[in-house]
Amino acid sequence: MDGLVIKPKWADMILSGVKTWEIRGSLTHKRGTIGIIKSGSGLVYGTVELVDCVPLHGPDDVDLILGNQDKHHVALGAIKYLKPRAWVMQNPIIYPEPIPYKHPQGAVIWVKLPDNLELLQGENKLG
């Protein structure tokens, strides 16, 4: 499973189901279950299903961004990407307790997580 590194505020909103679009500056072809990692924590807090990637840089981009603000919660002026995309997420699951993982040096957006991550809940370290 892959883990997505996100600032804590946004990670909490995604895992609570309030934020279903994560605005990013790049395209992703990943689909399926991904872990949600709060940046700087060394912990996976839960999972979501990554189901789509919507371009937000066409002729109607402003209307699309403003019309879906309830999905991403980002002010129009705060989006600094030249070609923003909405990574569409659903079915959030919050782990009862966060799971530690080994963060590889240089990983900023994606981290490769063990496939059996859920089985590691309650352990102090990855085996």
Image (cartoon, grey):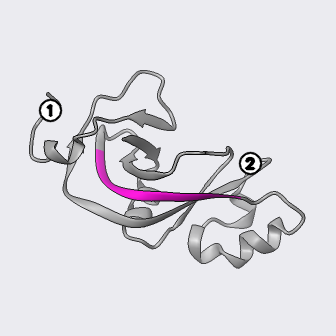
- Residue type (three-letter) at the residue carrying disc 1: Lys
Decide: few, some or many residues near mark 1? Use Cα within 10 Å; few <14, some 14-19, many ≥20.
few
Residue segment shown in magenta: 44-54
Image spot of residue 6 (x, y percent): 46, 48
When asked about the image quadrant of residue 79, the answer is: bottom right
> Decide: marks 1, 2 in contact (CB < 8 A)?
no
Point out the tag, 1 or 2, that comes first from the N-terminus: 2
Label at residue 21? none
The residue that label 1 is drawn on is 125
Left or right of 116, for residue 65? right
Q: Quadrant of the N terminus?
A: top left
Q: Residue 46 lies in magenta, yes or no?
A: yes
When asked about the image quadrant of residue 62, the answer is: bottom right
Q: Residue at x 67, y 43 (%)?
A: 26
Decide: few, some or many residues near mark 2? Use Cα within 10 Å; few <14, some 14-19, many ≥20.
few
Image spot of residue 94 (x, y percent): 28, 62
Q: Secondary structure at mark 1?
A: loop
Q: Residue at x 85, y 60 (%)?
A: 58
Label at residue 81? 2
